[in-house]
């Protein structure tokens, strides 16, 4: 990706709680158009299309960007006689429920399907499909000894 923004923060809250978060925002990765066939008959099927006598340049198109923000809230307790530490954890990934749609980095060029996304079965997905995980919240318990 030509541009990336990554951040990580940890903050100690009152009563022994710790709050941490990460964010990642990226611009889209390059996409190269392909014919999907051996059009120049050299035995390789990664040929780029020629439209109006001009060959498409490599990485001429851009994928969609990516967005993610995740949070963790943690409370730790030291066990009696220093036998260890017990931590209660709540994790939330994709807190803002971003809907990121991704496309393959090499797309077959046809007017009807170019820059369309495919699902995990290889079928063309609707333009509103979600490729990344939706918001997820999980609770955890960690014992350190």
Image (tube, rainbow, N blue to C red):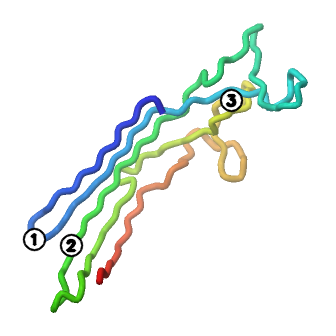
Quadrant in which residue 102 is drawn? top right
Q: Are marks 1 and 3 in contact (CB under 8 Å)?
A: no
SS assignment at label 2: strand
| Residue in the image at 39% along x and 47% along y | 68
| Residue in the image at 34% along x and 47% along y | 23
Q: Residue furthest bottom?
A: 81
Considering only order in the chain, which callout, 2 or 3, is on the residue closer to the N terminus? 2
| Residue in the image at 62% along x and 42% along y | 126
Considering only order in the chain, which callout, 3 or 1, is on the residue closer to the N terminus? 1
Q: Position of residue 5 (x, y in %)?
A: 35, 38
Q: Position of residue 106 (x, y in %)?
A: 67, 34
Q: Disc 3 designates what residue?
A: 114
Q: Disc 1 designates what residue?
A: 15
Q: CA distance from mark 1 to mark 2?
A: 9 Å
Q: CA distance from mark 1 to mark 3?
A: 54 Å
| Residue in the image at 49% along x and 43% along y | 100
Quadrant in which residue 33 is drawn? top right
Q: Are marks 1 and 2 in contact (CB under 8 Å)?
A: yes
């Amino acid at each position: 990706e030509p541009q990336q923004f990554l951040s990580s923060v940890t903050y100690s809250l009152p009563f022994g709680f710790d709050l941490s978060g990460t964010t990642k925002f990226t611009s889209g990765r390059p996409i190269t158009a392909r014919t999907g066939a051996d059009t120049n008959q050299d035995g390789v099927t990664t040929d780029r299309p020629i439209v109006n006598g001009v060959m498409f340049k490599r990485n001429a198109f851009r994928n969609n960007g990516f967005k993610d923000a995740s949070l963790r809230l943690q409370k730790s307790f030291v066990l009696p006689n220093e036998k260890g530490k017990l931590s209660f954890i709540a994790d939330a990934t994709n807190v803002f429920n971003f809907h990121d749609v991704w496309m393959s980095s090499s797309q077959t060029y046809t007017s009807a399907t170019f820059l369309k996304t495919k699902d995990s079965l290889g079928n063309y997905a609707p333009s509103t499909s979600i490729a990344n995980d939706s918001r997820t919240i999980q609770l955890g318990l960690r014992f350190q000894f």
